[in-house]
Image (cartoon, grey):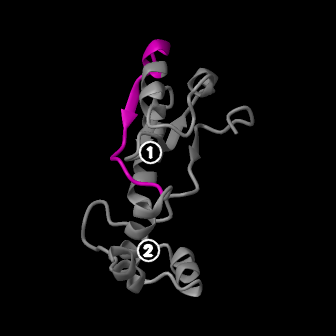
Amino acid sequence: MLDDGAHAACVLNSDSPTLPTSLLVQAARLLLEQPDRVVLGPAEDGGYYLLGMGAPHTHLFEDIAWSTGTVAEETRARASALGVELVELAPWYDVDDRDALLRLIEEISTPATGTALAPYTAPVTAACLARIGLRRAALSLAAQ
């Protein structure tokens, strides 16, 4: 995208269906204000849900221990070594395990409103969970 003239670009994970839209807007604003920075959206498990930049800093992706709890920290260190300003967004979670799936089910069952980081309602994910029978009732079974 950057080679095709985009002002900035972000890579985004595919396993945070309730990622608040406000975080995406914040990343876009930060990159529009200063495209030579890197924007990192850290995941609670040590990875990241978003990495944005206005220049192709390929070193940020090389020789990373992917799928580990050190990915975000390694990315921070790489940005520092490159001398690139790194701005972090609020952390969010991704759905990699049973506990995160249960959290997702709960979040979709009782959407939060009125908070700065209100989760996205994820209607397609909610419909999929309902279709396969993963509802709030699954939480009580999981707790047993």
For the N terminus, give its image quadrant: top right
Residue 14 horizontal/vertical position (percent): 58, 56
Please say if 117 is above or below 110.
Answer: above
Classify residue 62 by image quadrant.
top right
What residue would you read off at disc 2? 121
What residue would you read off at disc 1? 27
Mark 2–mark 1 distance (CA, rounded to whole Å): 20 Å
Q: Which mark is residue 37?
A: none
Q: Nearer the viewer, residue 144 or 83?
A: 144
Please give the name of the residue rendered at 61% of the width and 22% of the height, measured from the top-left corner. 63
Q: Nearer the viewer, residue 24 or 80?
A: 80
Please give the name of the residue rendered at 29% of the width and 73% of the height, measured from the top-left corner. 112
Helix or strand or loop: what does disc 2 sit on? Answer: loop
Residue 6 horizontal/vertical position (percent): 65, 39
Q: Nearer the viewer, residue 37 or 142?
A: 142
Q: Looking at this rendering, what residue extends furthest in the right direction?
A: 4
Query: Start and end of the magenta stretch?
Result: 79-94
Helix or strand or loop: what does disc 1 sit on? Answer: helix
Q: Nearer the viewer, residue 14 or 57?
A: 14
Classify residue 87 by image quadrant.
top left
Please give the name of the residue rendered at 45% of the width and 36% of the height, measured from the top-left corner. 39
Amino acid type, residue under disc 2 in the picture: Thr
Q: Is residue 36 magenta?
A: no
Q: Disc 2 vs disc 1: Cβ atoms closer than 8 Å?
A: no
Amino acid type, residue under disc 1 in the picture: Ala
Classify residue 116 by image quadrant.
bottom left
Q: Residues within 10 Å of mark 1 (few under 14, many from 20)?
A: many
In this view, the mark in front (2 or 1): 2
